[in-house]
Amino acid sequence: MLSAHRDRSKILAFPCSYDGLSSRLIEEAGFPMLFLSGFAVASSHGLPDTGYIAMAEMCDKIQETVRVSTLPVMVDGDTGYGSPMNVKRTVEAFAAAGAAGVMIEDQTWPKRCGHTEGKSVVSRGEAYARIRAACDARNEGRDIFILARTDALIHGWDEAMARAHKFKEIGADAVFIEALPDRESMRRAVAELDMPMLANIIEGGMTENLAARELGEMGFAAVAYPWTLVASRLKATREALEGLKRSILEGGPPPMILGYDEVCEGVGFGKFKLFILIYKGDPLDYSEYRHTALYFHFPSSRSIMHIVGCPGLFRYVNNIDTDPSVMGSLAKVIPVTEIPTDIGEESISQTVARTPIRNGRLDLDWNCQNWVGDALARLVERGWISADQRGVAIDKMADACLEAGDD
């Protein structure tokens, strides 16, 4: 966020999540970070964002998220759940749970969604004490980013800016002024504060729905989307339930929303199966030699490139006259996808022909299936295949290897 503040060609844009699955999907979609929003988390409990969710429940959500995602996690700390001492404890607890950042606001308790009617804010003194307590927790050794939020725009521009300036003076890493109405007020706030600022885009909410690129050009360092996944879940679930009810009443089969393999991959079965293979041991332990590797077929040159991760055997190319799927030397071929035709053999080899290094030495504890999974991940990073394609391929590879191991 600090880097984006210094470069207006950049902006951190990220959705808000509410549980482990939504957080993992955000990472798979390629976003750089995620925000555990109070609104979204409350919705996952079937509740509105009106102060129902407590600190312990948010800590549970943080731990649930960091177990399945490697992204930095910003967390909505609401009002800090009490006095400034409670704020300090909240920041410490969130950091211990794995949060990379925390947002603390100046609403009264019970707080509510910043785009709804009836909200109010505490006095300046209490607001400043909350942010000071949060910064103290950070300064005492907690590795956590402090985002200070004010909802004081309900009392006018001057009040909101006075609080934001004081938050900056106290030591907040970034500031968020809730419910700025339009691009003019947004541009003015960025110019007057001259510090990292967060924008908050709620589809159809009080703030003008501007593009992330325009917000970055204005000077915003980050933009969050707290309603997007909640709205999509509401819409998709209602439509699925209506479709199921209709099929029951009309005597038809249930609606096919996603294929069986897609659902299994979506909830993580492919990764689980890969772990089984990794911890089962190297296939060389089998009575019959079995090996898993990546093959790249180049029809134009009538060649197939076999890439493995073993030391000293990184790649070799064979000329072939037939499609690799019918090569007799391959017991099972799992098609993944076509990659762009302008990607050459050398580029592919440099991307995936690597062996992990541990403590300065080649990591020989990895087996070949582990390496294939990691190599496919590098292809995803380059944009040559999708995360879904990697997941389906790993799932099928795991099934094939487990079946072979049972022979």
Image (cartoon, helix red, strand yellow):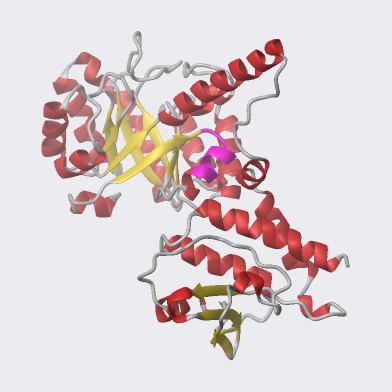
Determine whether 77 is above or below 113 in the image. Answer: below
Front residue of 302 and 213 = 302
**Residue 358 appears in the figure:** no
Horizontal side of residue 329 vs 169, given as left or right:
right
Q: Residue 88, position in %: x, y?
A: 46, 37
Q: Residue at x 69, y 49 (%)?
A: 269
User: In which image quadrant can residue 278 be found?
Assistant: bottom right
Magenta stretch: includes residue 24 = yes
Work out whether residue 72 or residue 174 is closer to the camera in this orientation and state it.
Answer: 72
The spot of residue 118 in percent (x, y) is 35, 8
Q: How would you classify the magenta stretch by its main secondary structure? A: helix
Q: Position of residue 63 (x, y in %)?
A: 59, 43
Q: Which residues are the magenta region?
A: 18-25
Hey, which quadrant is residue 120 in on the image? top left
Is residue 127 in sight in this rendering? yes
95 or 325: nearer the viewer: 325
